Amino acid sequence: MIEQRIHPASWQLPLGWQSESDVQPHVSRRQVWSARMYPHLKRAFDFTAAFILLILLIPVFALIALIVRLDSPGPVFFVQRRVGYQGRLFDFYKFRSMTNGQDHSQTHRKFAEAYIKGQGADHLIDEQGRAIYKPAANGQAVTRVGRWLRRTSLDELPQLVNILKGDISFVGPRPVLDYEVALFSDFHRLRLTAMPGLTGWAQINGRSSISFDQIVSYDIEYIASRSLSRDLHILLATIPVVLGAENTK
């Protein structure tokens, strides 16, 4: 199998951001050791936790697969190419939540272009008067079961397979689509210098109610000060966010 990447040379990343551990150029020996060990410890945690969760959640996977198939015709899983660490392309898994056989990509492309460029993308206003940035709703495209899966974030469970494979981590910037990367500024591309995640610092700080530049700022803040303890904090903080129906898309 040939591995595909969006080549890092085209990103023009600033010196000091070219590798996973080269975030801060002037650090102590202890910090250097921690930075070097962190990816290995993080990967060990990701693999172990994802493996255990996949075994424990087999009945849940089977039940969701059954109701997805009963609710609408089509495959159980939605597979999409995403861009990961240093531009590596991989197959990203979700439970299918939309009607099969329809092309919804153009709607999202238009939203993504406006959102990433900060051109006033379509948004809704919640009960507190805050902007909620997301593509315009299409009630006919999302299935009945799909609405429930999205509301509970259960559609994200198959990404445990991505974690097991090493495509993503439990914590990190959310992976993006290739056409979204094409719209990135140099500032935006800094988020590609870390392993993407199932959840992240931006997701627990108002994912659907902040601009894309704010998301990237949160991602870069996380990259510059990440640690296992901070990852654990983000994972625990994600629970009330999910229970509050704020998704991590």
Image: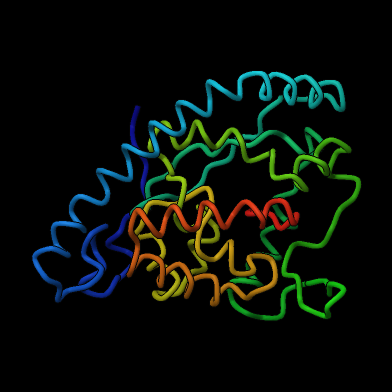
Q: Nearer the viewer, residue 228 or 186?
A: 228
Q: Nearer the viewer, residue 84 or 200?
A: 200
Residue 26 quadrant: bottom left
Q: Is residue 140 left or right of residue 159?
A: right
Residue at 53% across, 25% down: 54
Tag count: 0
Residue at 83% across, 71% down: 124
As drawn, 72 above or below 239: above
Residue at 67% across, 81% down: 119
Outermost residue on the left side: it is 29
As drawn, 188 above or below 95: below
> Looking at the rendering, in which quadrant would you find the N terminus?
top left
As drawn, 215 above or below 96: below
Q: Is residue 179 left or right of residue 151?
A: left
Q: Position of residue 186 (x, y in %)?
A: 39, 74
Q: Position of residue 39 (x, y in %)?
A: 27, 48
Q: Nearer the viewer, residue 62 or 242?
A: 242
As drawn, 243 above or below 205: above
